[in-house]
Image (cartoon, rainbow, N blue to C red):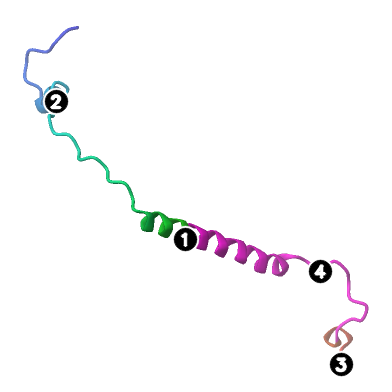
Amino acid sequence: MFRRREPVPFAFLVEADRFRSDVTPPPRQRASSGEIAGRWLLGLTIVAGLVGALVLGTPALSTPSGTPDQPSQAVQGH
């Protein structure tokens, strides 16, 4: 592979490939049982809200299946 001899504008990017850090991230702590229960409760509340909105909103979005037998008074002109 051919290497450039002249300096490049962002030489630190070229050297970043060779850099290795000796810093390791701290180990992740396990969530407590209270945190897990809280996450489950939050998820269950969100799902219940979406299902409730769907159940309550479905009748409002449906069209009437039949035509009314009597026209309204506004149509009759009274």
For label 1, the residue is 41
Front disc: 2 or 3: 2
Q: Residue at x 88, y 69 (%)?
A: 66
- SS class, disc 4: loop
Numbered tag placed on residue 20 in the rendering: 2
Q: Is residue 27 left or right of residue 20?
A: right
Residue carrying label 3: 78
Q: Give the range drawn in magenta.
A: 43-72
Nearer to us: label 1 or label 4: 1
Rendered view: 55 above or below 22 = below
Which amino acid type is marked by label 4?
Pro
- Amino acid type, callout 1: Leu
Confirm or deny contact between disc 2 and disc 1 (CB under 8 A): no
Which of the two discs, 3 and 1, sits closer to the camera? 1
Question: Which one is earlier in the sequence, the residue at label 2 or at label 1?
Answer: 2
Q: Quadrant of the C terminus?
A: bottom right
Q: Residues within 10 Å of mark 4 (few under 14, many from 20)?
A: few
Q: Quadrant of residue 58?
A: bottom right
Instruction: Give the residue displayed 72% in from the left and 68% down from the top.
Output: 59
